[in-house]
Amino acid sequence: MKSSLEIFLELLDSNRKGLNKGIYSVCTAHPDVLEASFKQAKRDNSLILIESTSNQVDQYGGYTGMKPIDFVNFVNGIADKVNFPKEMILLGGDHLGPNPWKSLPAKEAMDKAKVLIAEYVKAGFLKIHLDTSMFCADDKGDREKPLSDEIVAERAATLCKVAEETWSEYRKGQQKPIYIIGTEVPIPGGAQEEEDEVIPTTPEDATETIAVTKKKFLEMGLDEAWGRVVGVVVQPGVEFSDDQIFEFQPEKAKDLSENILAYDRLVYEAHSTDYQVEDSLVKLVEGHFCILKVGPWLTFAYREALLSLEAIEIEILGRDSKELSKLSDVLESVMLEEPKYWKPYYPGNEKQQAFKRKYSFSDRVRYYWPFNEIEEAKNRLYNNLSKAEISLSLLSQYMPEQFYQVCAGKINANPTELVHSHIQTVTGIYSRACGLS
């Protein structure tokens, strides 16, 4: 049986041959989102690509509290729960580099990044995105412009060398890691300011990134590792912010799309593809943006589903019931008490910020689901709805797509299946766009 990595590389090759095949990358550490994604991949009989970022998972635990090996065990535990074959899981590390420590001098930040890379490789992550594009505290240059290609490439090659040495020491005889280079603009997770348009990377800039990075790899004796560089992160012209979605415009990225075919084996990786319509995702795949990253849209869908269930709960129990979960109220209270995950990202007055905390496409809510008070409120919601029969008429009102699925006998009207089904509205879009369904 082929491994997930072999299948992944075959998909990339098919894409280069114009067969319009792609793969979407599930970028989240949320258990319900991951479980729903596993169910999607199981139904499609496809591999699943799951990635964690350098902020989520690092040698200190990241904001999830998980080190790389913990994340591997966490993902495998969810796979066991849904009986998904582990050989069809491909794990990736996203934006691996000095970003979490960019406030430190470059040497200190890079020393920590080296440990980060080593821990990811030791844990068995096979898809490694080398991202060294950020300024560190003592880097010279105009901070309004990108860090120089030479510095970025040299640091990327340095981290690749660490990855190769770590593989040789700890995982020799197993599959070697593959690498993604480059970065998108703006920073990962969605734009923080309103924009008029998002300009795609120019073919010249993509060419320069590839050429300079290859040069540094070869200078460091990483010839063989360069043969395992399979993707380049560029900006195809897609982005989202609090309430904006910039749709892919294929004609503006046409030259960029064609440019990648000048190289052996390489495809593009597109970040921030969340909230694109299905046709735009199809056109991205057709344009050799073969790897589509999705994250906030999945947890945004999770929030939508929970708030829909809360509306159903209120209709069933009544607004004055003391048994209500009060999930929205608890969520708002915790976010106000712990503003560090949203306040730097949500400008505006008090009313505007309140709206963004709940409904922003950037979905900073996703950082708060693990809080105990919120988890307890969610469990009360689930318990209340599990004890009551959810009427079809309420489903039709608040979760119309799930209403049709219940009527068709595809899912049961219990909270877990309803929530997972709503998340799979998003994964289904990506699955079809990538030719996996």
Image: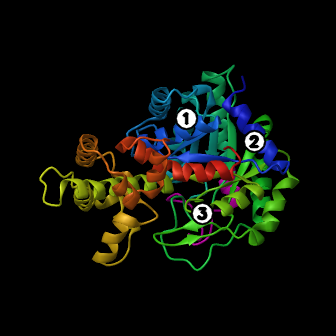
- Name which of mark 1 and mark 3 comes first in the sequence: 1
| Residue 112 locus on image (x, y percent) | 50, 42
Q: Secondary structure at mark 2?
A: helix
Given the image, on which type of amino acid does mark 2 rest? Leu
In the image, residue 199 above or below residue 181: below
Residue 175: image tag: none
Residue 11: image tag: 2
Task: Name the quadrant containing residue 197.
Answer: bottom right
Query: Is 60 placed left or right of 291 in the picture?
Result: left
10 Å crowding of disc 3: few (<14), some (14-19), many (20+): many
Residue 120: image tag: 1
| Residue 424 locus on image (x, y percent) | 52, 48
The Cα atoms of the two marked residues, 1 and 3, are separated by: 30 Å
The Cα atoms of the two marked residues, 1 and 2, are separated by: 24 Å
Q: Secondary structure at mark 3?
A: loop
State the residue at coordinates (42%, 60%): 363
* Residue 376 can be seen in this image: yes
Comparing 377 with 262, the one in front is 377
Over which residues does the magenta segment extend?
135-155
| Residue 258 locus on image (x, y percent) | 84, 61
Query: Is 393 placed left or right of 182 in the picture?
Result: left
Mark 1 vs mark 3: give the one in front. 3
Given the image, on which type of amino acid does mark 1 rest? Tyr
- Name which of mark 2 and mark 3 comes first in the sequence: 2
10 Å crowding of disc 1: few (<14), some (14-19), many (20+): many
146 in magenta: yes
Quarter containing the N terminus: top right
Residue 276: image tag: 3
